[in-house]
Image (cartoon, rainbow, N blue to C red):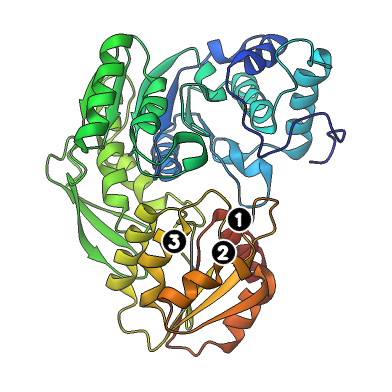
Amino acid sequence: MKGIPEGLLGSERTVKPGLERTQALLERLGHPESRFPAIHVGGTNGKGSVVAFLESVLLASDIKAGAYTSPDLGDPTERIRVGGVRIPEETLASLILEAVEPVQPLEEGPGRPTFFEAMTAAALAHFDRQGVDLAVVEVGLGGRYDATRCLAWPLLTLVTSVERDHVEFFGPGLHKAAWEKAGIAASGVPLLTAETKGDVLAVLTDVCRDSGAALTVVQPDDVELVELSWDRAVWASRSDPLGLERFETSLLGVYQAQNLSLVLAALAELSGGLEMRVDTVREGLRVARWPGRFELVHRRPWVVLDGAHNPSAARGLLATLERLAGSASRRTLLFGALRGKLVREMADVLFPHFDEVVLVTPSSDRAIPAEALVPQARRKARAWQVAGSVAEAAQQALARAREDELVLMAGSLTVVGEARRVLEAVA
C-alpha cells in the first residue's frame, strides 16, 4: 500500500491468534472502538452480502453507516466505507502509520501487527472520526480471536452459517469452526444465526449460555425466491417482520435467500431503536451491491463472476446457474483456487456441469498452480485446459465465446478480482 514503509506490517495473509496487538493499536488511536455502536457479522459464507444489505438499508434510511469487509478485490480501500464512500488511500495510510509507528518495534511485546489487524484499527478510527451512527463490521477469520472482536459496543452479533472451509485453521469438522465463530457472542447482546445444523447449534447454544448472549435462530428459508432474471431477483418473506410484502434485489444468487432471512431478522431487531420506513428498507435492499458475488459483468456472451471458494458456496452458485443459464449453448468455467481450500469437493460440484474447464493460477503466494489442478479436471471435467494468467484466460474466454454462451469465473476471490479488472478495462 502506498505510504506504508515496507516491512512495517506483517504479511496480508499472516494470521496470529490473540487480540493484544489490535488492542495496542487502538490504544494509540484513542480507543475509537468505544465511541460508536456496531453490528458484528461472522460466519463462513454470506458475511459480505449481509454487510452489504445492512449497509445499503441504513444509508437509504439516512443513517450514517460505516462498513468494514474483507478481503478486497484488489484495492484495500474497498474494505472501509462511510456513507458508502471508500476511505481515501492517503487517509488509510495515515491512520495505519499513526497506529503502528509509535509501537514499533513490537517484537518485545505482543509482536508486529498483521496487515488485517492494522486495517481493522484504521477502520474503527475512521468510523469514529467520521462520526458514524452505526458500523457494520465483518469478521475476518473465525471470530473469537479475530481483530474485529475488539468492538466495544455491539448492538447485534450475527452468524450467517458454519461450513467446512479454512481446514488448516479449523480442522476437517465443524465443531472448532462453530466454537471460533460463536466467539463473537457478547453478554446481553442478541446473537442471530441462520444456521440449523444440530451440531453447530449445540455449540452456539453452549457459548451463548456461557457468555450471557441471547441466541435467536432464524429460519434460513423464511425468505423465498419468487422471480429470478438476469436483471433482478424478487423475494417474499413468510414471516414478513417489516411488512415489506414482495421486494427485489440486484444480487441474483439464489443463496441470498438465507442471507436475506438473517438481514430481515436483524433489521427487525434494530427497528425499535432506529427509524427505518418500509419504503427505505425496500429501496436499500434493491440497490445493494456486492461485487464478485454472482456478478453479471457482460451480456451476450454472459460472463459471471462468483467468489465461491468452498463446496457449500459452489453448490449455491450452481443452483443459481441452473435457474439463469440453463439455455446457454455452451458453458465455460475459469477455475483457480488457493491452498487450504477443499478443491476436490469443489471440482466434484462444479466441473461436470461445464463444457470446458480452464485452469488458472491466481496471482497470490497461496495460489495452487493450475497444473496441480489437472488431476481434478481429469476426474470430473468433460474437457479441460491449463491456461496462463487469470488476465490472459479471461480475455481469451471473452473473445472466444459466442453471444449465447456463458463464461463463469470462480474458485477464489483472488481470481474474481483479477478477472474483474481485466473485464472492466475491455468493457
Q: Residues within 10 Å of mark 1 (few under 14, many from 20)?
A: many
The residue to which callout 3 is attached is 344
Tell me the residue at 49%/56% (across/down). 307
Label 1 SS? helix
For the residues labelled 1 and 2, the Cα–Cα distance comes to 9 Å
On the picture, is 128 further left or further right than 349?
Answer: right
Tell me the residue at 36%/70% (across/down). 230
On the picture, is 262 further left or further right than 293?
Answer: left
The front one of 303 and 413 is 413
The residue to which callout 1 is attached is 414
Which of pointers 1 and 2 lies earlier in the amino acid sequence? 2
Check the image and report above or below for 120 versus 302: above
Q: Residues within 10 Å of mark 2 (few under 14, many from 20)?
A: many
The residue to which callout 2 is attached is 336
Whether pointer 1 and pointer 2 mark residues with C-beta atoms closer than 8 Å, the reply is yes
Which residue is at the far right?
A: 5
Looking at the rendered structure, the kind of residue marked 1 is Thr
Which of pointers 3 and 2 lies earlier in the amino acid sequence? 2
The front one of 311 and 193 is 311
Q: On the image, which quarter does residue 346 sit in? A: bottom left
Residue 351 at what x, y percent from top left?
A: 41, 72
For the residues labelled 3 and 1, the Cα–Cα distance comes to 19 Å
Image quadrant in which the N terminus is located? top right
